[in-house]
Image (cartoon, rainbow, N blue to C red):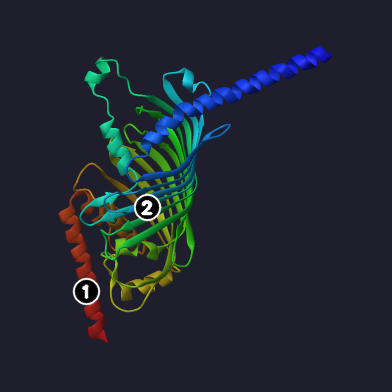
Amino acid sequence: MKRLIVLIGILAIVLIGGYFALTFYALKSIQPHLQKVAGPGLTLEEIKVKATHLSAQEIQYEDPHSKQRFLQIKEIRIYPSLLSPLKKSLHIKELTLLQPSFFIYRSREEGVAGPWVTVEKEREEKEVSEEERKKGREPLQIRIDRIRIEKGSIDFEDGKVTPTAHIKLRELGFEIRDIRYPFASLHSPIELKGKMEGRKQEGRIDATGWIDLKTMDLETSFRIREIEVKTFEPYYRKRVTAEIESGHMDLDSKVTVREKRIDAPGELDIVNFHIKEGGGTVFWIPAETLIPLLEKKKNEVKAPFHLKGNLGDPKFSLQETLLTGIGFSFMEALGLPVKGLAEGFFGEPEKGMGGLKSLEELFRKKKERKRRSD
């Protein structure tokens, strides 16, 4: 009996020792690849090889030229497969980003700048040509079972609209599974949860679905709850010149992208929607006409929409198309005579805009008749 216990004890020590040895060498094989990423502008405070994972702490990326900060991460944890060093590929069970902060900027002249710029540039520089493949130089095969983000944040500063928009996402939780590099065409499941800061309250964001990282096709169910309307004021200011006092949005949509074509039916519900009395319009509707219409609806409007378009077409504007579609649905939900105008706008823009001019003319004539009667 004693011999059996001693034998089991020795076997356990060998197995545990083998486990830690394999883990150590697996982590050692990953460490050089991580260190190579630390190019100009990217700093890491320290890299530690622990019992079960590789830990990189206090990562920060600052553009060397503009000195803008794009990325800050408290810690990255990499959990490798034990057999990864024995293969010609790199297999990571899980990659976790703890408390990452992403800073994204869009200027009127230079477009969008963010933390992915370095990655894209590096990818282009390391792309393997067919000639190199013939010489036997194969790219490193990377497989990641899961990438997770815990307590992340995104600050988006958009200078292309006036005034500059500031979108702040907090408490972000994100997960994507089954990633391959070089990218393979497969459906990688994704899940996103988080909050959006408002002036008086926080809204919620949820999305689940899949994405093909090779083709960038995706399908996801997208939902937002209790997000303040005024958060998006810089984007709708051209369509809304009246002062919005209060209101929050709930939105449900199923977003599909195939070959750069987006198809996103959904419904927007605006609750506790109050317009300040005075001048201005909301989606071509004079404020003085809109206020009594909203009161009849108890200051709530449900507006179904269907966003379609080619994302690869430079003439297609996602922002303008979405706002225009919501505008038509908004007016129709209030019982205004806009039937057929939306089809005209999306099918034949000139005909649709002509309809809008007719609608503006209708409101103007009503206003003139009211003044005469008074």
Q: Is residue 144 left or right of residue 112?
A: right
Q: Residue furthest right?
A: 1
- For the residue labelled by badge 1, is the local secondary structure a helix, a strand or a loop? helix
* Nearest the eye: 160 or 140: 140
Asked where in the image residue 285 lies, by quadrant, the reply is bottom left
How many residues crowd mark 2 within 10 Å: few (<14), some (14–19), many (20+)? some
- For the residue labelled by badge 2, is the local secondary structure a helix, a strand or a loop? strand
User: Residue 266: in sight, yes or no?
Assistant: yes
* Nearest the eye: 94 or 348: 94
Q: Is residue 318 left or right of residue 94?
A: left
User: Residue 340: in sight, yes or no?
Assistant: no
Residue 86, image x, y percentages: 48, 18
Residue 16, image x, y percentages: 65, 23
How many residues crowd mark 1 within 10 Å: few (<14), some (14–19), many (20+)? some
Residue 194 in the image: above or below residue 136: below
Amino acid type shown at disc 2: Phe
**Looking at the image, which residue is at 57% across and 32% down?**
52
Q: Residue furthest front?
A: 46
* Nearest the eye: 245 or 71: 71
Q: Earlier in the sequence, mark 1 or mark 2?
A: 2
Residue 75 in the image: above or below residue 131: below
Q: Is residue 168 left or right of residue 258?
A: right
Q: Which residue is mark 2?
A: 103
Amino acid type shown at disc 1: Arg
Q: Which residue is mark 1?
A: 364
Which label lies toward us, 1 or 2? 2
